[in-house]
Amino acid sequence: MSKGLLKSEELYQYVLEASVYPRETEPLRELRNITASHPRAGMATSPDAGQLIALLLQLVNAKKTIEVGVFTGYSLLLTALSIPEDGKITAIDVNRETYDIGLPIIRKAGVEHKIDFMESEALPVLDKLLKDHGNEGSFDFAFVDADKINYWNYHERLLKLLKVGGIVVYDNTLWGGTVAIPEEEAPEAMRMGRQLTIELNKLFAADSRIQISHASLGDGITICRRLY
């Protein structure tokens, strides 16, 4: 199943082959290839979205970041490669097993020391970060690719953790393109996620605290910059 939403699969492949893959580092390429054989490979961050995320990380000079939902670690490795040597990532996932798939590549790339991995539901970790002194308004960047039902709960907490001008990126905000078709035409397994995504996109559009860009990369990403 293509992760791209462009009408032409050939055009999507052109973007990857002309602009994304030539700039993809060897560790990221290795992890992407290993992940491709996983039964849930579709959960991985698409490399075209990853390319933009890496650019955003460097544009805001990100040093302290959060990742909610890790899977095998493509976006986590990308972040670790993009931030400074003394940068730190708080990485949260309920499944350590999938993180361990990418961990040998992360170690080989020499960036494991930048990652604080927590095997946990995300909300308790985010709430604890908010309670701990010095965390509120201190993070530069966040990436969310986890359970869609909690995206808005994550959003409320992340906006407090991010500094003004900080960025949070949400994945899967076009939900395989189903947001633009009638519910009855969507595969039954995608209908709940479709409705959650439609509601979430409305909330993002109405949130005066953020500047947004809804980009049709991968399965759709929404980039939110904290304004105040």
Image: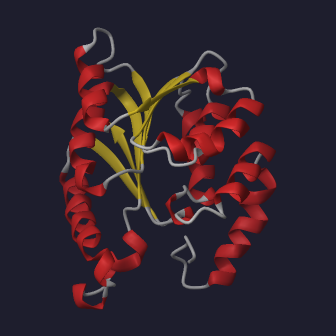
Query: Residue 91: x and y, percent?
Result: 46, 33
Q: How is the image coloured?
A: secondary structure
Q: Residue at x 57, y 63 (%)?
A: 41
Is residue 214 visible from the viewing direction of this image? yes
Q: For the C terminus, which image quadrant?
A: top left
Q: Residue at x 32, y 80 (%)?
A: 180
Q: On the picture, is 141 further left or further right than 25?
A: left
Q: Residue furthest top?
A: 133
- Give the residue displayed 38% in from the left and 68% down from the top: 174
Quarter of the figure with the N terminus = bottom right
Q: Quadrant of residue 153?
A: top left
Question: Vertically, is 167 above or below 53?
Answer: above
Q: Nearer the viewer, residue 56 or 186?
A: 186
Where does residue 158 sit, x and y in percent of width and height?
30, 34
Along the line of sight, the residue nearer the viewer: 61 or 135: 135
How many dots with numbers?
Answer: 0
Q: Is residue 10 positioned above or below 145 on the image?
A: below
Nearer to us in this view, 69 or 79: 69
Q: Residue at x 71, y 30 (%)?
A: 107
**Picture coordinates of residue 58, whole percent (x, y):** 60, 34
Compared with 208, 221 (above or below) is below
Query: Residue most toward the bottom?
Result: 185
Instruction: Locate residue 188: give its quadrant.
Output: bottom left
Question: Does residue 109 appear in this view?
Answer: no
| Image spot of residue 167 (x, y percent) | 41, 37
